Amino acid sequence: MKCPFCGSLESKVLDKRESPDEKATRRRRECLSCKKRFTTYERVEAADLVVIKKDGKREMFDRSKIRTGVLKACEKRPVTLDQIEQVVDLIENDIRKLGSSEVKSTMIGNLVMRRLKRLDKVAYIRFASVYREFADVRSFQKELKKLLKS
């Protein structure tokens, strides 16, 4: 591991711990040349995912797009940023559990709606109204009726 202070490649590990979410290993190191200490993190590299859009185009999976959509849906709602991050993590985990390197954007949209429905009903309706492209008040009412039944 290259020292960020002097560039030496010689260091020793002083302490090793798993991160609280157990998704990374934290290592406290000391450079053998300059004796300065620094921290490194080791994470499993997730396989690349490709999203197949409605028009058939393909693009790389971008978790920030899910986060942005969920943030907009939850705007001015009693939902914390921690809850939003947790929902985005759960959605990404659901996608990766599918075991495929390609996923349709409709699948992602449905996963987002399912998670939002559990988190906040108003956020769910906001997201659904954009995602499902409600054309008129009737389609909006229809979705509200389904929500009220459940």
Image (cartoon, rainbow, N blue to C red):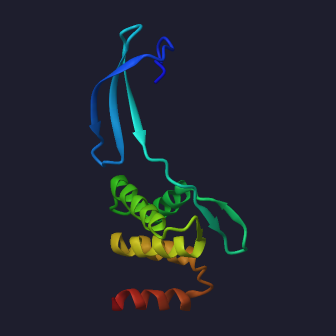
Is 8 displayed left or right of 136 in the figure? left
Residue closest to the far top: 34
Q: Is residue 113 above or below residue 33?
A: below
Number of callouts in the render? 0
Q: Position of residue 32 (x, y in %)?
A: 38, 11
Residue 39 occupies which quadrant of the picture?
top left
At 43% from the left edge and 16% from the top edge, which residue is drawn?
A: 10
Q: Is residue 68 above or below residue 131?
A: above
At 41% from the left edge and 90% from the top edge, which residue is drawn?
A: 146
At 58% from the left edge and 76% from the top edge, which residue is drawn?
A: 106
For the residue pair 127 and 137, the one nearer the viewer reads as 127
Is 29 displayed left or right of 107 in the figure? left
Is 42 displayed left or right of 133 in the figure? left
Q: Position of residue 110 (x, y in %)?
A: 50, 76
Q: Position of residue 84 (x, y in %)?
A: 39, 58
Residue 101 occupies which quadrant of the picture?
bottom right
Q: Position of residue 88 (x, y in %)?
A: 43, 60
For the residue pair 128 and 58, the one nearer the viewer reads as 58
Location of the C terminus (image quadrant): bottom left
